Amino acid sequence: MKLISGGQTGADSSIIAVGKSLGIPIGGHVPRGWRTERGPNPSLKALGFKESDSHDYASRTRENIEHSDATLIFATDPGSDGTQLTIDHAEEIKKPCLVLDPFEPAAAEAATQWLHAARPAVLNVAGNRESRSPGIARQAERVLHAALRAYLAS
């Protein structure tokens, strides 16, 4: 299994600690210039991320969906532009997609069940930025860790 994301703050960043903790390789496409809402983050390269040809967030979102088997979206605001683009593109190219609020008590269990059904070799993790949903990075990390630990143990 491999975890990928767009390298943004918030839900995307949850794969870094989870991958390290569970020994799962990580990566994904990041906008040109290693663009994040906090400014360029070239340290993502050393973690396995790749710089996209475009500065555009939408382009890298599509790339990550297309280079994965399924997309898990952590969002408290599923109507945000980026999250809606992710949902729409995954549906358009017929890739499994699940939207979860990581602050919901049953989120880890729902993610585990979905992982068993989707069985992705490459899992794209996306969702709200930290500025849109304060605390989402840490909460998504907790849920993703619990779900993957349970999924990989079975």
Image: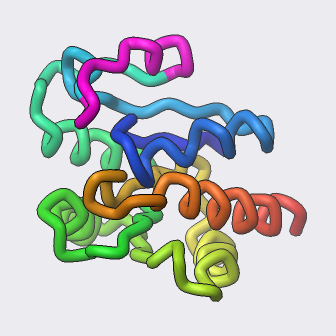
Residue 80: x, y in percent? Answer: 17, 67
Question: Is 91 positioned to the left or the right of 21 in the image?
Answer: left
Task: Say whether residue 145 is left or right of residue 137.
Answer: right
Residue 32 is one of the magenta-drawn residues: no
Q: Quadrant of the C terminus?
A: bottom right
Direction from residue 124 to residue 57 in the image, left or right: left
Q: Quadrant of residue 111?
A: bottom right
Between residue 104 and residue 57, name the one nearer to us: 104
Residue 99 visible, this orientation: yes
Task: Name the image colouring.
Answer: rainbow
When asked about the image quadrant of residue 31, the answer is: top left
Occupied quadrant, residue 144: bottom right
Q: Residue at x 61, y 41 (%)?
A: 2
Image quarter where the N terminus lies is: top right
Which residue is located at x 35 percent, y 59 percent?
127
Q: Position of residue 110 (x, y in %)?
A: 61, 83
From the top left corner, tell me how far across and down residue 132 is, in percent.
Answer: 26, 60
Residue at the spot 18% in from the left edge and 75% down from the top edge? 79
Is 5 placed left or right of 29 in the picture? right
Magenta-drawn stretch contains 42: yes
Residue range in magenta is 36-48
62 vs 51: above or below: below
Q: Position of residue 14 (x, y in %)?
A: 54, 48
